[in-house]
């Protein structure tokens, strides 16, 4: 299916979703949310896809936030509904059983930083800029920003960013633990792909177990989180990948993972 506002493609076993409204710096309107939902459903149901990369079309922006022209006409109920739809699609993104990398190639503001934070990790160009500028528009983050930002960088830094609307550089975002790695602009795509290929070479069952255990265990107390880890560890033991991974080590060869339970 072709889309109006995003480009969805697959390169070998890596899916790529590109926000594709470069004239408005890939701002998100309701159509983007609808198409993203559909594209994510397709990614989730395709067993051959092992990693997803999200990025922005053009050289200026990942996503510069919700489309302000559209949002400015919202009634309170429409605002609430758009916020909810955006939040749901980000829960859908977060729940994908495969790793998701945000490849941030420019502005990641408002809804843009919120999408990036729902990915498993963020790789950014050195020229990228991050921020929650909603306060300057008289509103607040609406796609989960107040919640995910505070969980990622701590309450006080999240409050500072959301209360000032300040834009920070990729390096500053890395310093506060929001971004994993920063690359020169021209190297960003190649480095992101390199990481995607590395993740794709790992066992599907154990990758999913790491993701689920960290995601679901994060808000639990340590003991509950560790119980969840033991359960996931046990499930891994029931996978062909565990036989293959440990067997390959003992036989001094490279493991070839198939992603199957026994
Ligand atoms: N919405 C609509 N249009 C936009 C947006 C946006 N978020 N961002 C940029 N554009 C448009 C500009 O209007 C401009 O259009 P035109 O060429 O027709 O004038 C074009 O993109 C290029 O932008 P600029 O000329 O402004 O480019 P600059 O390089 O000068 O500036 C900036 C780049 C700093 C990124 C600037 O465009 C900017 O500040 N954009 C707005 C950023 C922002 O405030 N984002 C947050 C939006 S609110 C939000 O995301 C809330 C999410 C949750 C919503 C919950 C539901 C209600």
Image (cartoon, helix red, strand yellow):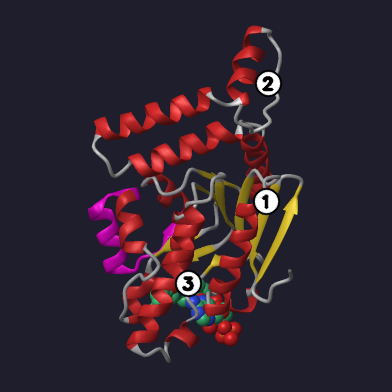
Q: Report how far apart the C-alphas of labels 1 and 3 lie in the structure.
A: 29 Å
Q: Quick one: label 2, few (<14), some, or many (20+) residues within 10 Å?
A: some
In the rendered image, which residue does mark 3 sit on?
A: 65
The tag earlier along the polypeptide, 1 or 2, is: 1
Residue 234 image offset from top left, x and y in percent: 45, 25
The quadrant of the rendering that contains the N terminus is bottom right
Whether residue 252 sits left or right of residue 136 in the image: it is right
Where residue 85 sits: x, y (%)? Answer: 45, 72
Whether residue 103 appears in this view of the structure is yes
Determine which of the numbered discs, if any, sits on residue 235 in the image: none
**Residue, disc 1:** 46
Badge nearest the viewer, 3 or 2: 2
Label 1, label 2: how many angstroms apart (C-alpha)?
23 Å
Residue under the image location 71 percent in, 13 percent down: 253
Residues 238 and 256: in front is 238
Q: Nearer the viewer, residue 34 or 114?
A: 34
Determine if the C-beta at disc 3 is less than 8 A from ligand 1. yes
Residue 255 shows which numbered tag? Answer: 2
The disc, 1 or 3, on the residue closer to the chain's N-terminal end is 1
Secondary structure character of the magenta stretch overall: helix
Looking at the rendering, the stretch of residues picked out in magenta corresponds to 152-169
Give the vertical position of 71 relative to 48 (above or below): below
């Amino acid at each position: 299916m072709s889309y109006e506002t995003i480009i969805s493609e697959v390169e070998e076993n890596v899916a790529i979703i590109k926000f594709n409204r470069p004239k408005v710096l890939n701002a998100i309107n309701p159509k983007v949310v609808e198409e993203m939902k559909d594209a994510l459903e397709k990614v989730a149901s395709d067993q051959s896809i092992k990693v997803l990369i999200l990025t922005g079309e053009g050289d200026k922006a990942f996503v510069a936030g919700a489309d302000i022209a559209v949002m400015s006409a919202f009634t309170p109920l429409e605002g609430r509904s758009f916020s909810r739809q955006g939040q749901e699609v980000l829960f859908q993104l977060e729940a994908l059983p495969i790793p998701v990398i945000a490849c941030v190639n420019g502005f990641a503001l408002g809804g843009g930083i919120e999408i990036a934070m729902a990915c498993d990790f963020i790789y950014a160009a050195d020229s990228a800029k991050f921020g929650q500028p909603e306060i300057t528009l008289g509103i607040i983050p609406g796609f989960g920003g107040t919640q995910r930002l505070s969980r990622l960088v701590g309450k006080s830094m999240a409050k500072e960013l959301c209360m000032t609307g300040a834009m920070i550089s990729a390096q500053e975002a890395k310093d506060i633990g929001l971004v994993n790695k920063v690359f020169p602009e021209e190297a960003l795509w190649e480095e992101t792909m390199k990481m995607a290929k590395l993740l794709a070479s790992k066992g599907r069952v154990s990758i999913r177990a790491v993701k689920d255990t960290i995601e679901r265990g994060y808000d639990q107390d340590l003991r509950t989180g560790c119980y969840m880890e033991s359960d996931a560890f046990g499930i891994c033991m029931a996978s062909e990948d565990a036989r293959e991974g440990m067997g390959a080590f003992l036989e001094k060869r490279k493991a070839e993972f198939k992603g199957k339970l026994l």
